Image (tube, rainbow, N blue to C red):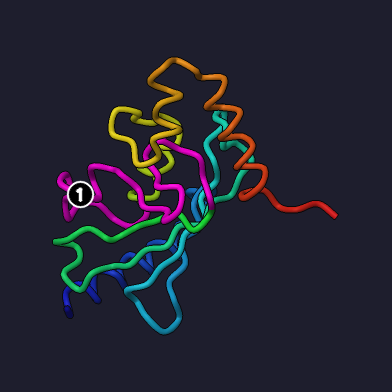
Amino acid sequence: MLASRARLFKEYKEVQREKSVDPDIQLLCDDSNIFKWTALIKGPSETPYEGGVFQLAFAVPEQYPLLPPQVRFLTKIFHPNVHFKTGEIYLDILKNAWSPAWTLQSVCRAIIALMAHPEPDSPLNCDSGNLLRSGDLRGYQSMAKMYTRLAAMPKKG
């Protein structure tokens, strides 16, 4: 547990130092618990998520970095690899392809990449996955844009 705490403090310091380096990611540590983090990520450009800001919740295990963090979307998102109700993310690096070389920041980058390049063959959201698998890109994009507007964009007025 001490090693994981030390690693998280190191990551926290790096995040503070590199805030301007990656403007698409804002990682925040819970003031009272180093094992709880949130992130705000910007939807990638030229995707239905562009213009949206999505909140992620990180639950970091005490065995970190030997075990991956549990990450989920708090912001509703229409994406084949994200469970619509729970926000659970299906991403190999959060499951069987985890390596201690990954950091919370690099996990955020991988999630942004997944947003831009969905994997419809391993869906957690079957409606979204089926639209992509059947070739209905227009239907998928319009649904994803609608949910981005409803859930991930600041309300005007």
Taking the spot 30% from the left edge, 68% from the top edge, the residue there is 10
Which residue is painted at 45% across and 53% down in the image?
85
In the rendered image, residue 67, in percent from the top left (x then y), is placed at 17, 61
**Front one among 128 and 104:** 128
Estimate the x, y position of residue 35 in percent, counting from the top left. 32, 74
Q: Is residue 19 visible?
A: no
Q: Tell me: 130 left or right of 7.
A: right
Judging by the rendered image, the residue that carries numbered circle 1 is 95
Determine crowd level at label 1: few under 14, some 14-19, many 20+ residues with C-alpha closer than 10 A. Answer: some
Q: Quadrant of the C terminus?
A: bottom right
* Residue 48 in sight from this viewpoint: yes
The type of residue carrying mark 1 is Lys
Q: Element type at marker 1?
A: loop
Q: Residue furthest top?
A: 135
Looking at the rendered image, the quarter that the N terminus falls into is bottom left
Image coords of residue 129 (percent x, y): 39, 30
User: Which corner quadrant of the image does residue 37 belong to?
Assistant: bottom left
Provide the residue span drawn in magenta: 76-105
Identity of the residue drawn at 23% across and 42% down = 92
Residue 11 position within the rendered picture, expressed as x and y whole percent measured from the top left: 33, 64
Q: Quadrant of residue 109?
A: top left
Horizontal placement of 28 versus 36: left or right?
Answer: right
Q: Is 102 included in the stretch rendered in magenta?
A: yes
**Measured along the vertical axis of the image, is residue 131 above or below residue 153?**
above
Q: Is residue 41 left or right of residue 94?
A: right
Q: Nearer the viewer, residue 50 or 25?
A: 50
Q: Main secondary structure of the magenta part?
A: loop
| Residue 91 belongs to magenta span | yes
Which residue is at a point 37% across and 39% down the rendered structure image?
81
| Vertical side of 89 occupied by 27: above or below | below
Camera-nearest residue between 139 and 64: 139
